[in-house]
Image (cartoon, helix red, strand yellow):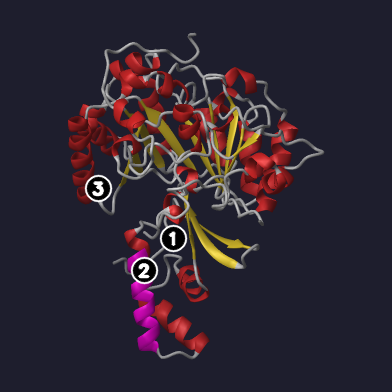
């Protein structure tokens, strides 16, 4: 089949990060891909991405600010006509550096918070970073860049959604992403301590819906579906290797940030001999779950197969050991009981990223 | 509705050579425009009123002013809802 057009490049330029988030979706084996490619490699990858049809790029990680050449990468992306997003913890970011990034064409900043207060950063990221994040949000607004506030929701902060909305309003955010934790990487390891109660989830959903209605026209409020509590799976990445192409710090090309956890696939690195476009179009791993030929029943005859694309392959692999099975988050999955059983919260006992 | 609409600070109008269409890019999203919508958006520069935009387009396309005016208002309303105009 001919490969679809990717619209977004997720450039995961470094796995280094000063935070230790217990819900981090980086694979726990992230150090296997932590060797970092050179500036020239990233510039070539940006050129190839634009050629492939990409129009947006997210500079993310880990913490993308860890790389001193971020300015050069933003500048190239901007010159290629890409809309550039910086996805950051805000640590460490001085105003002068953000000014340099803005001058080179940075379009938008997505800033993460662990919750509405300093204690949440300490509890879930093992770093007292809240005040620094507040300062960064201020710089973003002073430079007239649009600001997205992103908060991963889990059992430890989901009861504070009203306070989180208030924080985003106070910061003058353009968008608020309330992203229910997805069970990848450290979040998967910590799932028993992170899974919320269904009552908390319902309450959070109501508060988010009310905020959406109240703030319409001023701030977008997104409530990212918690697939473990939904009857249908999420359309993970809008389909495998379909709209998003992602490159890891060592140049490995993947369809999503968690894909290397699927150890039955081998992903290739973009090099001067093997381009991003070649890999996107011809790599067996990229083609593994495109279209519907790979689908088992009940997916293949499901009327939602073009809606959710069979759900998340990483989740199928993590929970069932086979990436080609129906996502067990779906109630139609013959193995759905695995997800149901995982909904019971347990006492908090965290594995902190970077502390193992 | 804005009287002199202008593309929002957070949004960028971009020609997509690959599909030969204009698109608006904004935080983590994109919107592909058809040809007539693109002509309207290109005139949303903050200096022209809704009426002037409609008159300009009616003059260049030869379409009835009333119809063009309706199209302009409908598109501006849709883009304002997405906060792509200010």
Residue depicted at x 50% and y 28% = A321
Q: Is residue A156 above or below residue A72?
A: above
Mark 2 lies on a secondary structure that is helix
Res A178 seen here = no
Question: Which one is closest to the eye, mark 3 or mark 1?
Answer: 3
Kindly give the residue lying farthest to the right in the view shown: A273
Which numbered dot is residue B76? 2
Mark 1 lies on residue: B7
Marks 1 and 2 belong to one chain: yes
The quarter of the rendered structure image containing the N terminus of chain A is bottom right
Of residues A278 and A7, the one drawn nearer to the viewer in this rendering: A278
Is residue A24 in the magenta section? no
Question: What segment is highlighted magenta in the picture?
Answer: B65-78
Element class at badge 1: loop
Number of numbered discs: 3
Discs 1, 2 touching: Cβ within 8 Å:
no
Most foreground residue, A356 or A168: A356
Q: Return the x and y of residue A122 as percentages of the image width and height.
A: 34, 14
Does residue A285 appear to the left or right of A214 in the view shown? right
Residue A156 visible in the picture? yes
């Amino acid at each position: 089949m001919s490969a679809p057009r990717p619209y977004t490049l997720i450039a995961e330029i470094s796995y280094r990060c000063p935070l230790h988030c217990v819900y981090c979706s980086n694979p726990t084996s992230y150090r296997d891909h932590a060797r970092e490619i050179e500036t020239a490699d990233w510039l070539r990858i940006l050129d190839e991405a634009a050629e492939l049809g990409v129009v947006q790029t997210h500079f993310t990680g880990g913490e993308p600010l860890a790389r001193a050449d971020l300015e050069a990468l933003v500048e190239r992306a901007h010159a290629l006509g890409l809309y550039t997003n910086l996805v950051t913890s805000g640590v460490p970011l001085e105003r002068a550096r953000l000014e340099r990034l803005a001058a080179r064409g940075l379009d938008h900043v997505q800033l993460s918070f662990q919750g509405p207060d300093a204690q949440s950063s300490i509890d879930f990221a093992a770093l007292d970073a809240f005040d620094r994040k507040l300062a960064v949000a201020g710089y973003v607004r002073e430079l007239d860049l649009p600001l997205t506030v992103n908060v991963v929701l889990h059992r430890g902060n989901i009861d504070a959604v009203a306070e989180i909305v208030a924080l985003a309003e106070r910061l003058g955010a353009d968008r608020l992403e309330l992203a229910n934790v997805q069970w990848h990487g450290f979040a998967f390891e910590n799932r028993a301590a992170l899974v919320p109660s269904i009552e908390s989830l319902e309450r959070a959903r109501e508060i988010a819906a009310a905020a959406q209605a109240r703030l319409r026209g001023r701030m977008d409020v997104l409530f990212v579906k918690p697939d473990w509590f939904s009857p249908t799976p999420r359309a993970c990445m809008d389909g495998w290797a379909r709209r998003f192409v992602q490159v890891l710090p060592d140049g490995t090309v993947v369809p999503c940030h968690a894909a290397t956890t699927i150890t039955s696939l081998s992903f290739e690195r973009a090099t001067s001999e093997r381009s991003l476009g070649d890999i996107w179009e011809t790599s067996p791993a990229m083609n593994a779950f495109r279209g519907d030929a790979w689908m088992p029943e009940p997916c293949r005859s499901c009327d939602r197969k073009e809606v959710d694309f069979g759900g998340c392959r990483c989740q199928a692999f993590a929970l069932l050991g086979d990436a080609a099975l129906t996502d067990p988050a779906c109630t139609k999955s013959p193995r759905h009981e695995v997800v149901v059983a995982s909904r019971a919260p347990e006492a908090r006992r965290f594995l902190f990223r970077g502390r193992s | 509705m804005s009287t002199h609409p202008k593309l929002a600070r957070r949004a960028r109008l971009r020609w997509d050579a690959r599909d030969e269409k204009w698109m608006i890019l904004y935080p983590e999203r994109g919107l592909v425009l058809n040809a007539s919508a693109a002509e309207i958006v290109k005139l949303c520069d903050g200096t022209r009123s809704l009426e002037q935009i409609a008159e300009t387009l009616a003059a260049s396309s030869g379409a009835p002013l009333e119809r063009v005016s309706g199209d302009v208002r409908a598109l501006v309303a849709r883009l304002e809802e997405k906060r792509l105009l200010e």
